[in-house]
Amino acid sequence: MNSDASFDNLHNQSCPDLRIYWQIEKIRNYEQFILKSKDNSLQFRFNATEGYALQHFNGQWTIEQVQKRCTQKFGEVIYADFLEELLHKLVTLGILVDTIDENSDNIATIPTNSSNYPHLKAYIQWIAHPEGYWILRNPEDVTYLELDNRCKIAIELLGKLPLSAICQKCEISPEQLRYLLQLLTATAMLEGTKPPKPPRKKFTPLQLISFKVRLFNPDTWLNKPASLLHWIWTMPVFVCLCLFIACSTVVGLDIQRQLIATGSALMSHQGAALMLPFGLLVMMVVTIHELGHALTLKHYGGIVPEVGLLFMFFIPAAYTNTTDAYCLVKRRQRVFVVAAGVLTQLVIGALALWLWCFSVESSWLHHTSYLLLIASLFTVAVNLNPLSKFDGYYLAVALSGINNLRSRSFGFYANLLKGNWDEEKPSDRFILAAYAPFSLLYTLLVFGSLLSFLIHWIVYYIPITAIIMLLLWAIYYIFPRPA
């Protein structure tokens, strides 16, 4: 009930009928009463005087009459504002909600239904993280939130207490709780909510650099191969793979002159004709790479909700959504999920090296195995770059334990400018301080080079066509979208 409201006109009003959603019972052998919701989801204890008064909350007695009956039964124990404070308590607990009659400025109290309180879905999971925070995981929509202990307590009280009581109990402001509810809604954690659809944005030419096409949900299909191949994730197999890759590396370094000579010969004889088979082999390697991520995550009990095609400069490759690896408690498991793709590429490259060594020169197998080796090494070099958001970046996140490394590194410098020196842990500050400048320099160099090459090519080959297409796009982009 509003604290600034007056109770001068309350005495002649009828007590609200709690029997709509609530029932009062006396506890045997105790001078206490329990008020519980009819769905048994909520229970509140009251002392003898409060319980006796609540027995009259049936819509037939006025507040003044109940006050008199309590005074007659308990005598001087009942003070003058007893009923007013009881109403305050009922509103604070969410048993009643207050409304104001605009015509008479009187306050009316209405019993609330506990099922109307915002509450989590039944299958939402809490995961305790070793770093000291909690992960709230939605396994159906594959969303999650990283929360501290105070937010966890507040969320656990949803559905049990009204929002005002949660703010008081957890010592958080209504704005903080409102923001927390917005996060729970956006991640479809609350009952009756669904993940919001991403806003439709107008097309921009930059989208041609990289875009995704979702195909299907492979999670159920991956269960069987992950169970059949469980032996792959054992320590003996891992050691054997590492030894195989190490031996292949030694052999590759020993015959590197022959490898370089083979590459030069292929380029001189076939030239641009190699682009198509090389591109197809890159696609195959990347597809197996993504399958390694997905099966490793399934092995550790994660969810793979999405598989599709990733186009970079119109070159297609497969991708899988393995963000659920974030919810794995053990850092070692998160590292293995990320490293599985790179390990798969290295194994493919090692197999290709041995095929090249033992195949007949000038045969199709000799040439194909060489191209497969180069495709594997090329994709490993691209993937292991920690300055772009490929496997190298996520491997750095998993190894360091610093989630959202890129954004937090730039935020680290923003906090320094504001004078907030202690926003990050001392052990993370060096990594954050080093990552931001290197990432910025890399982005400027790569995109600057690409943009320079693209502009030069357009001006030299298709200047008129480019100007027409740019004008058409500007008209489309500026013209308002129909409501």
Image (cartoon, helix red, strand yellow):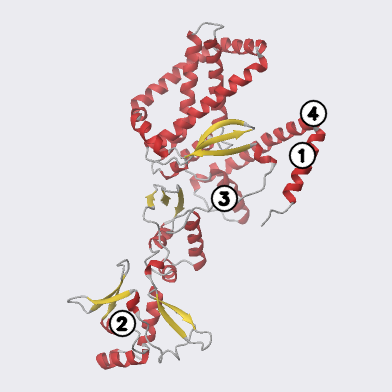
Residue type at mark 2 is Leu
Q: Are marks 4 and 2 in contact (CB under 8 Å)?
A: no
Binning the other alpha carbons within 10 Å of mark 4 as few (below 14), some (14 to 19) or many (20 upward) gives few
Residue type at mark 1 is Met
Instruction: Identify the residue position indicated by label 1 in the image.
Output: 469
Instruction: Identify the residue position indicated by label 4 in the image.
Output: 461
Rendering coords of residue 386 (x, y %): 55, 35
The numbered mark, 2 or 1, whose residue comes first in the sequence reads 2
Residue type at mark 4 is Tyr
Outermost front residue: 482
Q: CA distance from mark 3 to mark 2?
A: 49 Å
Q: Residue at x 50, y 52 (%)?
A: 195
Instruction: Identify the residue position indicated by label 2 in the image.
Output: 54
Instruction: Identify the residue position indicated by label 3 in the image.
Output: 198
The numbered mark, 4 or 3, whose residue comes first in the sequence reads 3
Q: CA distance from mark 3 to mark 1?
A: 27 Å
Q: In the figure, 287 relative to 303: above or below? A: above
Q: Residue at x 66, y 10 (%)?
A: 269
Binning the other alpha carbons within 10 Å of mark 1 as few (below 14), some (14 to 19) or many (20 upward) gives few
The numbered mark, 4 or 1, whose residue comes first in the sequence reads 4
| Nearest-to-viewer mark from 3 and 2 | 3
The kind of secondary structure element at disc 1 is helix
Q: CA distance from mark 4 to mark 3?
A: 37 Å
The numbered mark, 4 or 2, whose residue comes first in the sequence reads 2
Q: Are marks 3 and 2 in contact (CB under 8 Å)?
A: no
The label number, if any, that marks residue 4 in the structure image: none
Q: CA distance from mark 4 to mark 1?
A: 14 Å
Q: CA distance from mark 2 to mark 1?
A: 75 Å
